[in-house]
Image (tube, grey):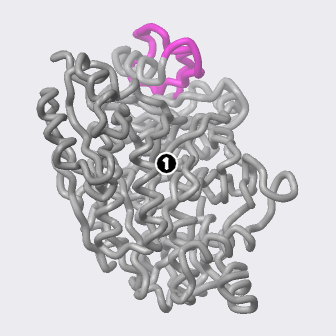
Amino acid sequence: MTLLAAAAGAHCAAASAAAADGTVRVIVGFKAGTVANGKAALAAAQGNIVQDLPEISASAAQVPAKALDGLRNNPLIEFVEPDQKRMPFAASTPSTGAPYQLGQQVPYGIAMVQADQLPDTYASNRMLCIIDSGIDLAHEDLHGNHVTGDTNPGTGNWYTDENHHGTHVAGTIAAINNAGVGVVGVNPGRQLNLHIVKVFGADGWAYTSTLIAAANKCGAAGANVISMSLGGGDRSIAEERAFDGLARRGVLSIAAAGNDGNDTQSYPAGYSSVMSIGALDQNQQIATFSQFTPKVELSAPGVDVLSTVPMGTGRAASLAVGATSYAPREMDGSPAASAHAPLADFGLGTATDSTMAGKVCLIKRGSVSFATKVSNCQASGGVGAVVYNNVAGGLNGTLGTTVTTIPSVGVSDTEGASLLTQVGQQANLTVTATNYALYNGTSMATPHVSAVAALVWSYFPQCSASQIRSSLDKSALDLGTPGRDPYFGYGLVQAKAAYDRIRSQGCGN
């Protein structure tokens, strides 16, 4: 689950790897009635508690590696496990005026999950907690919502978002139905209560213990639904215990299935007390990156999802060569800039070439990274870069940490073939700053389901979390193999169908 959710997720190295000082970070669970004595034993082993987890009688601690066996054999201690890493796992049409005001975009996912058929009139009786990288609270499409929050030490303020991920998630849930501005979310009427718990700072990952503490902060704030566009590849006893406890308290927890495109189980999505969400494209096909496991429960839009990002950090691109207009995707990391110059064939862009001076470089994907290609174009005197795909489909490229000064975009293989016939013609390439962005990922699917759960539940607050969960499963649009399957789960979440089912059959059916 990658930070920006635009590429397949990567699992970090095991959190139990020894630090330079010979210590490891672990979660230590204490046996019933032995917490105080267990902590004393942990201190005697020179363990330094960094996160107390009283709800599950455990503590996260930095402990000398040589002391682990002794702790595991201590009769006061129930378990010692690595404190794993958890990471964030990222198309529209103009509003017609019904039900959304004119002058804003309606992301395709809104209609796909039937949110446009169920007003969020009663959403003020629900609270949805987002555990992520914070949000840009001042965003033009979010600032009118009812929002509270918590910050974990070292991550920065919950009302700022250095990684853009949490703001994108929040927009899918609750971007405001405001005439002439931006997009709409599943709950656009400024009714839903949001609570933000920030666990990801600029470095883009958090420990399991941090996630556990964050989830319990959600519970303490009165959350009905917890939305987690995040995960990692290793099971945790402590984490499972925490989410089981929240489920017993009536909280519905929902998490991303993961972006590795394989059958590996991610967590917390793999626990029975958490709903696991897969990603679909606008044609209701499973996304190639969406992990498929028996735990996948529902699916939702997760490809090219348009939503909010911190003000001015989004990008939009345009490209015209001669009389032909194209549909490029800006490179992640491209500056907002324009280039107006002849188009030139730069091949694979693997080395500098002085003949590119003053030109817009047309570059084929392959051999070296996108960042290297764009950097070589710039070093050659190129004023803009267009990278075309070497396989079927569009190209979503990233420059990573490489800083460039020229605008850069990606286009499909077919557009690349067309552009090759236009070498020498005038190219007009522009990348502009916006407040919105298209992201891919199960991170983008998860808030659709979380928001639908809160929306439907707001009409039937007498229903329990488990009953809402069951109703969402039973009313989903079955896709793929009939019945539940590892890709789609029970199918595409459907707000109006879930509402209709509960209204006609009651909470428990």
In percent of width and height, residue 509 lies at 73, 81
Residue at point 55% right, 79% down?
464
In percent of width and height, residue 2 lies at 45, 39
Left or right: 265, with 160 as reference point: right
In percent of width and height, residue 267 lies at 50, 44
Tell me where the magenta segment starts and ends, as one range: 343-368
The answer to whether residue 230 is above or below residue 332 is below
Q: Amino acid at mark 1?
A: Pro
Q: Which residue, as the protein is rendered here, is positioned at the far front?
A: 75
Residue at point 63% right, 39% down?
289
Left or right: 44, with 142 as reference point: left
Tell me if I can see residue 177 in this picture.
yes
Q: Is residue 312 magenta?
A: no
Q: Is residue 355 magenta?
A: yes
Based on the displayed image, in which of its 4 quarters is residue 68 positioned? top left
Question: Could you say whether the residue bearing mark 1 is in a helix, strand or loop?
Answer: loop
Front residue of this view, candidates 116 and 344 = 116
Residue at point 28% right, 37% down?
203
Front residue of this view, candidates 301 and 424 = 301
Q: Which residue is mark 1?
A: 268
At label 1, counting other C-alpha atoms closer than 10 Å, the crowd grade (few under 14, some 14-19, many 20 or more) is many
In percent of width and height, residue 407 lies at 39, 36
Q: Which residue, as the protein is rendered here, is positioned at the far right?
A: 482
Residue at point 16% right, 27% down?
45
Front residue of this view, candidates 279 and 152 = 152
